[in-house]
Amino acid sequence: MSAESILRVEGLRTEFHTESGLVKAVNDISFELARGETLGLVGESGCGKSVTNLSILRLVQSPPGKIAGGKVLFEALDGSRRDLLAVSEEEVRVLRGKNISMIFQDPLTSLNPVLRVGVQIAEAIQLHHGLRKREARAKSIEMMRLIGMPDPERRVDDYPHQFSGGMRQRVMIAMALSCKPDILIADEPTTALDVTIQAQILDLIKSLSARDATAVIMITHDLGVVAGMCDSICVMYAGRIVEKATVDDLFHDPLHPYTKGLLASIPRVDAAASAEGSQRLYSIPGAPPSLVGMSDCCPFHPRCESAMGICRSRLPPETVHAGKGPRSVSCWLHAKEGR
Amino acid sequence: MSKSRLAKNSIAMTGVVIVALYLLSIAVSFFWLPFDPVAMDVEHLLEAPSLATGHLFGTDEFGRDILARIMKGSTISLVISLCATALGSVVGVLMGIWAGYLGGRWDHWIMRVADVLFSFPSLLLAIFVMAILGEKTFNVVFAIGIVYIPQFARISRGAILTIKSSEFVRAARSNGAGSSFILFRHLLPNILVPLIVQVSLSLSVAILLESSLSFLGLGVQPPAPSWGNMLSGARKVMVLAPWTAIYPGLAISFLVLGFNLLGDGLRDILDPRLRNVR
């Protein structure tokens, strides 16, 4: 673990036991998050992004889910280091919301409809610091002012249904940041919002995390969000990380065929305006594989344009690659050994 | 907000007025009764209702004033009904929400016990419990309470099951909330609506159950007046003196009606699907 690293995930595997078989939703994932860094986790729906992050906080519903292996090493400010998968449930509970907190996708369902938002914002502080009602209320108002809520003294007593979608997501952010956590996990925080609000919410997350030097894990399927927000990116496919790189490296020189495909399928305003303006948008052929009973092959090979014989029989190893920042890729095209 | 909705709902308001009238009569009965409800009066046996004698509802086979006995009996009936419903709802809800929230083996066993209790007709179960505990007035509370436990357990378990996998529960867990915090702070307030309605309807059924038990001689013991044992006494003289049966019967019917109207009205008021946008 490097000096400024705050979270290191090693070989994380999460499985779901379903009627149709064992689903390896997260399959041998490793990554590292530095203090104050913003890490993007990108991939299609169902590739295991959310499960990865629920596993970090041990929030995967069990049964049917089960964390089958790996380590989640969290280093607190005082330098103590813990494997979150090995400690007691109570020890993880104390960390949740205080050191690591989450923002969920849908702000409509993530707030309890029968509790006033002020009560919900102060919940984490009350749970972890045992504030009195009046202090908690004052703290809620302070948080609401911080997230740019107009007239917080009055709105602190309102119920979630009295807020717009964007305001609800702001409330969620206030909830998540109320204890000044070390790590904020944002699980597609803007997917349920319309485009004009998305930028505001992203700006808010960006400025508040910069203020408290909070590390952010941003889960998204929107590469535009990643480009604007993140320092480095992990691209996930079928439960595995296929490429890790800094934003600059990834966007200028994608290595993995899947990453190339993703970047090629972003609609570009400038391309549409050029001479061949009416060309069709690229899409990666095929569909993501079923995660039931995955065999030892590159999961992307059925859809890959440069698939070789070895891709069908062996899993590509993670290979470190030269770039402006640290980067690695799991693809036989770039593997140094075993070909 | 809900106060004005209550006032606008004529069904619920009718229920409120009826129940309030009974509460008023109870309050009055503590300070003033037209006659002594237990004192026999051999000179006025089975007298028809009349203004002249002051026996507005007539007298029974022992010459006791029926109005006074109904007023005195309403206290007993309502107290038993309230206590039994409180007992049944608190125990049943606690069992049900834990069963629903924990799931698995807990859920299985708690709900099987509830199924067994459910398989008996409620009056039969109440008689069974009274036979075990003995014929004391306060045991009626236990008998009816036990009848109610599985009903409340089922309703609250079902309601918890539908909301326990909500995003906001997961959000609360990600905030560091423990199981009982989530259950009592987040989930219980969300299922209060069906529970409030059930409480109101249960109050009326408890009145009926208590009257039935007393009618059968298992509940409130004579000479203490209860609507049930008044009807039981009236059975023999009903043809001669119909007022001995009519007035206690009306007392039961109206209170049951009041609670039912209140319950139905509350359901309309509190059901979010029927609620207008504010």
Image (cartoon, rainbow, N blue to C red):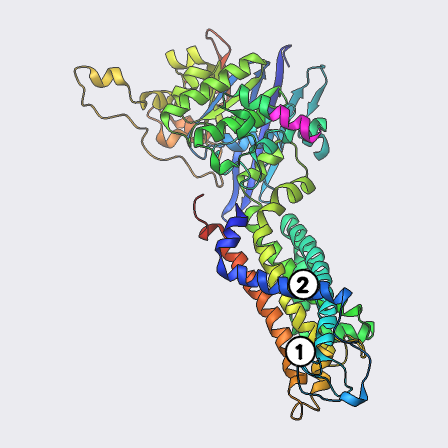
Gap between marks 1 and 2 measured at Cα: 17 Å
Whether residue A114 sits left or right of residue B135 in the image: it is left
Name the amino acid type tagged 2: Leu
Identify the chain of the residue marked 2, using the numbered disc in the image. Answer: B
Q: Position of residue A190 (x, y in %)?
A: 44, 27
Whether residue B42 sits left or right of residue B213 in the image: it is right
Residue at 26% from the left image edge and 18% from the top image edge: A269
Task: Please identify the quarter of the rendering in which residue A282 is found.
Answer: top left
* 1 or 2: tag closer to the N-terminus: 2
Residue at 72% from the left image edge and 65% from the top image edge: B28
Q: Position of residue B177 (x, y in %)?
A: 66, 35
User: Visible in this render: residue B227?
Assistant: yes
Q: Residues within 10 Å of mark 2 (few under 14, many from 20)?
A: few
Residue at 35% from the left image edge and 27% from the top image edge: A304
Task: Please identify the quarter of the rendering in which residue B217 is found.
Answer: bottom right
Depth check, mark 1 against mark 2: the one in front is 2
- Extent of the magenta region: A132-140
Q: Position of residue B35 (x, y in %)?
A: 77, 76
Vertical position of residue A100 compared to residue B226: above or below: above
Residue B24 disc label: 2
Q: Quadrant of the C terminus of chain B?
A: top left
Of B24 and A241, nearer the camera is B24
Task: Please identify the quarter of the rendering in which residue B49 is found.
Answer: bottom right
Name the amino acid type tagged 1: Pro
Whether residue B148 sits left or right of residue A210 in the image: it is right
Q: Position of residue A246 (x, y in %)?
A: 47, 13
Q: Say if the magenta span includes residue B250.
A: no
Of A155 and A72, nearer the camera is A155
Residue at 50% from the left image edge and 22% from the top image edge: A317
Return the residue at label 1. Answer: B248
Vertical position of residue B2 compared to residue A244: above or below: below
